[in-house]
Image (tube, grey):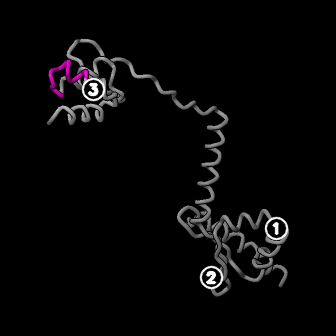
Amino acid sequence: MDQMEKIETLREKTGCSYTEARAALEQCDGDLLDALCYLESHGKSLVAGAYSSTAQEPPPEEPRQEQPQDDGAFAKGCKAFWDGIVALIRRGNRNHFVMTDKGGRQTLSMPVTLFVVLLVAAFWVVVPLMVVALFFGCRFSFAGPELGREDINSAMGKATDFAEDIKMEFQE
């Protein structure tokens, strides 16, 4: 490797100028590794974190980068609230509100999230329709990993049985 190649290598590795690289090579009798160490020890290397020394001293401290500021309690509370809403919507989309007719055929199935939105938006329409459906022998239940449990569906079945009892009393 000739002198020019060594100078170019030093410039690439350290980011120093041509003059500094040439002076370092002359100082170290043309030894590339020694010249690299010489530039780093004299602070001429622009490579971040580059440091070499044979002395028993610690490397110079790097400038500290500012840490991102911690979110405040309000921001953490808002994030926790939002995460809870998202988890609730996902759970509602995994479970379904199911309506079956007298013959046991499924006539309606919708995600619980949609059912809750309809219930909130059109309460005075949805609830009377559900009561009318109960009197016509329809049964309501939930299906899914969280709401498809027997205890929840037995409570829904009791509402249907109660509607049947009222219907029987009116027929007598």
Res 28 quadrant in image: top left
Res 79 quadrant in image: top right
- Residue drawn at x 80%, y 64% is 121
Give the number of the disc on residue 2.
none
> Looking at the figure, which quarter contains the C terminus?
bottom right
Viewer-closest of 16 and 121:
16
Q: Is residue 38 above or below residue 167?
A: above
Ranked by sequence position, the earlier of labels 3 and 1 is 3
Q: Is residue 132 magenta?
A: no
- Which residue, given by chain and number where applicable, does mark 1 sit on? 122
Q: CA distance from mark 3 to mark 2?
A: 83 Å
- Which residue, given by chain and number where applicable, does mark 3 sit on? 21
Residue 99: x and y, percent? 67, 77
Give the prevailing secondary structure in the magenta stretch: helix
> How many C-alpha atoms fall within 10 Å of the one at disc 3: few (<14), some, or many (≥20)?
many
Q: CA distance from mark 3 to mark 1?
A: 79 Å
The amino acid marked with disc number 1 is Ala
Instruction: Magenta stretch: give its range.
Output: 23-32
| Left or right of 4, for residue 92 | right
Q: Is residue 24 magenta?
A: yes
Farthest residue, direction bottom: 103
